[in-house]
Amino acid sequence: MTEHDKVLLTLQVNGASHEVAVEARRTLADTLRHDLELTGTHVACEHGVCGACTVLVDGDPARSCLMFAAQAEGSEIRTVESLAGDDGTLSDLQRAFSANHGLQCGFCTPGFLMLAEGFLAERPDAGREEIREVVSSNLCRCTGYQTIVDSIQDCAERRRETKETSA
Amino acid sequence: MTFGAATEGGEREPDLRVDGSWVGAPVTRKEDPRLLTGGAQFVDDIHLPRMLHAAFVRSTVASGRITSVDLSRVLEVPGVVAAFTAEDLHLGDITPRLDRPAEEHTETSMPILARERVRFVGEPVAVVLADDPYAAEDGIEAAEVTYDVTPPVLSEVQALAAGANAVHDEAPGNVLLDVSMFATDGIDDVFAEAPCVVHVRASTGRQNALPLETRGVVAGWDPRAQQLLVQTCTQVPHQVRTALAGSLGMAESAVRVLVPDMGGGFGIKCVVGREEIAVAAAATRVRRPVKWIEDRKDSLSASFLAREQRYDARAAFDETGRILGLDVDVLCDMGAYSCYPFTVGIEPLMASSEMPGVYRVPAYRVRGRAIATNKAPTAPYRGVSRPQHVMVMERLVERAARELGLDPLEVRRRNLITVFPYTGVNNVTYDPGSYLESLNLCERVITDEGWYETKRTAAEQGRFLGIGYACFNERTGYGSDAFAKRKMQAVPGFDISEIRMDTAGSVVVTTGTMSHGQSHETTMAQIVADKLGLPLDKVRIQQGDTDRVTYGWGSFASRSITIGGTAVALAAGNLGGKLVELGAHLLETQRDNVELADEGVRQRDDPSRALSYQDIADVAYLKSHLLPKDTEPGLQASASFDGVGDGTFSNASHGVVVELHRDTGRVEILRYVCVEDCGVAINPQVVDGQARGGIAQGIAGALFEKVTYDDNGEPSAASFLDYKVPTACEIPDVSMHHLETPCLFTDNGAKGAGEGGTIGAPAAVLNAVNDALRPTGVELNDTPITPQQVFDALTGALEVAP
């Protein structure tokens, strides 16, 4: 097999099963974007630093530019396209980003959303400093980060309030 | 709407919706839903049938003659479809022009693909097209290019040395621009007789504007429109059209530039890139659409950079700290090429004109030079020179305060312009601002929060805390008169807006500006909605399409809300006039008896007699036989606006508290306070966002980011591992405070807000670091401030301390 030979993969993405034939060297990010046409996941450095390509792999935030698509077979992948409801209703996390002006150009935003989605699932009680530490995983050039931290904190607090009310 | 004058402590209420209007309200952005759901379309999201992917063979040497280019092996690579050199494409050069005499400016050209010579590592030599981007990358690795290498010129010292190699033959001394300006009569005597003369030599690091989305383009021939369709992420679509059509030898009407969603720009996308043109030319050759997406390595090393400047500045003061004179020599390392449309004058001309800033400077002399080196070229970057020259000006003030034993804030107060309009020694007339008020408020916030006490306590514990300030203004809303003083051959300034109301009573409004994160789809809609009494969802802003926008200068120089925002307001006002006129006809009353209200018009003397916009549109489009005989069908209007005089000046004061860490040399920012005045904020949340994001980029320049090269001119920071972009752990929360001195000539009192944050941060951070270093006697002048410098300074202090 050469690097140009294609491999047939079955990927579970956003709850649906997709068959794709891609070169073994193709990254998960490129496969999501250009083969599955889920272009919400963005690529901004291709060396795993900026985090714009962050998706959830079995619930954990991962750099999809540092994974080959072939490595994702058998895992459950979630991208930004999975967050809103089928009718386009924004999730609480997405609403918090909008309410707090946590995005400007929006290019890094899907990465931050998926980072936060994975993080809050694991650490629903996180406080501001812990959130800031996690936000430092990714790069944003527009906001100065403050409103991204605000957005995630706002979402976490609302979720905790909702939980208390319903408990 | 009425506005109070800016007063000390006159902070804007954060959630105020002035008079029930959209302007002034922190409304949620119209852009957000698509950006939050993955529904936006950035350039790399575009996919066209039969589309090929481009990659560039780039120079591996900084300076030399190309002795051979062999692409034969490239074409054997699986997936590669074509490869072109400069000889294959026959493209015209990009030649940015300044209307200045030869002794001031040497015109140079940038070829689209390098011919004969290469002038920096990363310069494009050939373009390879393939079925997918991986194959295109394989292809460029198979290219064989040989060079006759010449020693590169990598600094201003090397560039100006006798016998230095010329980067361009036209400029044997490597000086592309050399202007000496103002030179007030008797300035040498002022310095000779002044009781206090301070001297600052400072250098600032080369930086990358670094939008998260790199540059990119998709170009292809559209057989239906008989046009070359170029979808590119640019801040200046019409200027790309001009340069591209010129280079390809096409009529501008045969080119349509369309801008998709854009992932930031900050100036790097405000000039025409040679790759945009090469890709368009290659697409026409193969008669297939071609996509090029810049990778991060090329973006960091081979796109457009900025900010590398050297200052040799003196200022004269009297005993009380009043400025008597300012004498500045600024060298700007512009790299290998002049940028279109701004030219190589962009940084030195800005610094020369604006250096006196917020201070009354009675005597001024400046020499500004643009130097060519064998490094990637430069473009405007958010703030353009002002982050640097404000830092130097503020350093001069701080130095004088030390020499004279005065409080640096008091020295500032004694020199700030407080009476407006003020015409400076630099022939610039400043419109009203809140220079003194912003500084006073900034100091008061820092004081009230107890930072001076914290600093004292920390000093007793042997810790190094410092407090620093920056006070500055920013010219925004340059009109064509103001830009004409730059003597660019293409003179930006005005903006045109066209507005159409449809049969449903909704409007589409064009703007020649180009939002790339600044929220214009929301803020301009707020302006238009107020003019016509419409809800926001009935206003749609259209931008970034050279076929639909008559002409535009794009977004730069914080011009969008001042110039573009006023143009949309005037166009909406004109449409309102038309609606009133038609309404009066249909209501069978006098025009002055009709006013706009409730998404329609009503009779002033009998408000029960009213028509909705939809009623009027129904006549204008579907029952045009009811229109007055001399009235054309449809509901459309247009307007243009040009900046007035020298433009309008936003201003701000920044206050920073830092702690220097002895063990690591780290500069930790403990507090950041920004008091800004951009006149009337159309959307306060957006203004805060612009300021905070700008401050983050300013801090990046002050403490972290620097593009460096090895001795051969090889870029040594070509990934995010080496080019240190600050994260949420380095950038502090910013406490925002507002003053409001409305602009007198924009429609709603707004001034520009896009760049100020970036301008103030380097000065404030440097001053704070120097304040913290006070016990050591060390004063730093250069940015970025490195941990090593701080560590060395503090280590010395520890040795001195008992």
Image: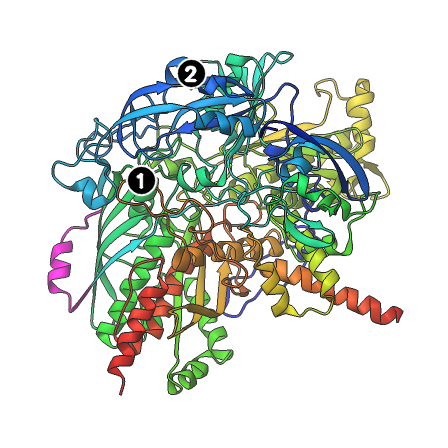
Closer-to-camera residue (B318/A138) = A138
Q: Residue type at mark 1: give it.
A: Met
Determine which of the numbered discs, if any, sits on residue B334 in the image.
1
| Residue name at image x 60 percent, y 64 percent | A132
First-in-chain label (2 vs 1): 2
Task: State whether discs 2 and 1 lie on one chain.
Answer: yes
Q: Quadrant of the C terminus of chain B?
A: bottom left
Q: Chain of mark 1?
A: B
| Position in image of residue A90 (x %, y %) | 78, 49
Closer-to-camera residue (B781/B640) = B781
In the picture, measured across the screen, residue B255 lies left or right of residue A22, that is left
Q: How is the image coloured?
A: rainbow
Q: Residues within 10 Å of mark 2 (few under 14, many from 20)?
A: few
In the picture, measured across the screen, residue B88 lies left or right of residue A77, that is left
| Residue at disc 2, secondary structure | loop
Residue ID for mark 2 = B72
Q: Residue type at mark 2: give it.
A: Ser
How far apart, in angstroms, are the residues tagged by discs 2 and 1? 35 Å
Quarter-of-image position of residue A87: top right
Quarter-of-image position of residue B318: bottom left
| Residue name at image x 65 percent, y 45 percent | B522
Q: Does residue B501 sit above or below B93 in this rendering?
A: below
